Amino acid sequence: MTSLRLWSRARGRYARESARLFFKRPLVISSQVPFISFSFDDFPRSALYTGGSILRSSGLAGTYYVSLGLMGKQTPTGTMFLREDLSVLLEEGHELGCHTFGHCNAWETKPDAFEDSVIENRRKLNDLMPGAAFKTLSYPISVPRPFTKRRVAKHFGCCRCGGQTFNVGTTDLNYMAAYFLEQSRGNFEEVQSLIEENRKAKGWLIFATHDISDDPTPYGCRPEFFQSVVRCALTSGASILPVVQVLEALRSPTP
Ligand SMILES: [Zn+2]
């Protein structure tokens, strides 16, 4: 291995460790039922019109983490949402979450600039959709800097990252784990066993991806694959809700 690769691996490990260790906001997951959420980042139109209709056909809703600065653009994750898609999304009962205005890399961006972009996204949302509000966030591209976790904590009920696992026991609201479906590279068995582990642990599994298309980008997945994951999630008996609704359920458990 070249010293450059060793250095970049060490740097990645350092980033993940420091993101995990500092400025925690603990949430103990204690529930009678497992939870599953489906989330989409950026977000491409196909996430709403293909992914969203798969969810809706089973009476479900998802969470769309939007960077409003990407509206109408073409990006590595596909053709981005348009202004009118935001109304459709909310009418269909999905959650609109924050992904910063400028799609800021959570590790590379200085904490104050990251927070400015969170505020800008909120301001833009107020212009486009008066009355709507972001209640949860997903960090773009990378793990957050510890001081970024601290900065954004006051704006959101919880903030989602990656990690390819589910949340169980004492978790960190500033650093919730998610499983990116595209990283399974179509390995359905891996997803299936994660859903099963989440069921046994009565945890909270948050799925994430980008586009849902017959010809997906490297950051998305195919409709049949997504449909199979949704079916498996339903079979597990999990309560399947947008991120903000799971948070509310966990904060006020039924006696
Ligand atoms: Zn993103």
Image (cartoon, rainbow, N blue to C red):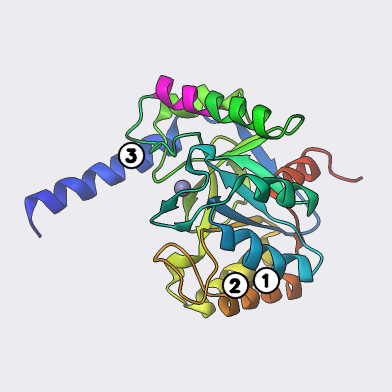
Main secondary structure type of the part rendered in magenta: helix
What amino acid type is highlighted by mark number 2? Phe
Q: Secondary structure at mark 3?
A: helix
Quadrant hosting residue 144: top left
Q: Secondary structure at mark 2?
A: helix
Q: Give the left or right position of residue 153, taking residue 79 as reference.
A: right
Please state the extent of the stretch shown in magenta in the rendering. Answer: 111-118
Mark 3, mark 1: which one is toward the viewer? 1
The spot of residue 104 in percent (x, y) is 41, 36
Report the residue marked by disc 1. Answer: 230
The quarter of the picture where the N terminus appears is bottom left
The spot of residue 151 in percent (x, y) is 50, 22
Residue in front for this viewpoint, 186 or 221: 221
* Residue occupying the point 51% across, 65% down: 181
Q: Give the left or right position of residue 60, taking residue 82 as reference.
A: right
Which residue, as the protein is rendered here, is positioned at the far left? 2
Q: Give the left or right position of residue 27, taking residue 118 as reference.
A: right
Quadrant hosting residue 155: top right
Residue in front for this viewpoint, 218 or 148: 218
Residues at badges 2 and 1 in contact (C-beta under 8 Å)?
yes
Q: Which numbered tag is attached to residue 226?
A: 2
Q: Is residue 23 visible?
A: no
Disc 1 under 8 Å from ligand 1? The reply is no
Residues at badges 3 and 2 in contact (C-beta under 8 Å)?
no
* Residue occupying the point 57% across, 43% down: 66
Decide: few, some or many residues near mark 1? Use Cα within 10 Å; few <14, some 14-19, many ≥20.
Answer: some
Q: Which numbered tag is attached to residue 15?
A: 3
Disc 2 under 8 Å from ligand 1? The reply is no
What whole-number distance in Å separates the C-alpha atoms at marks 3 and 1? 32 Å
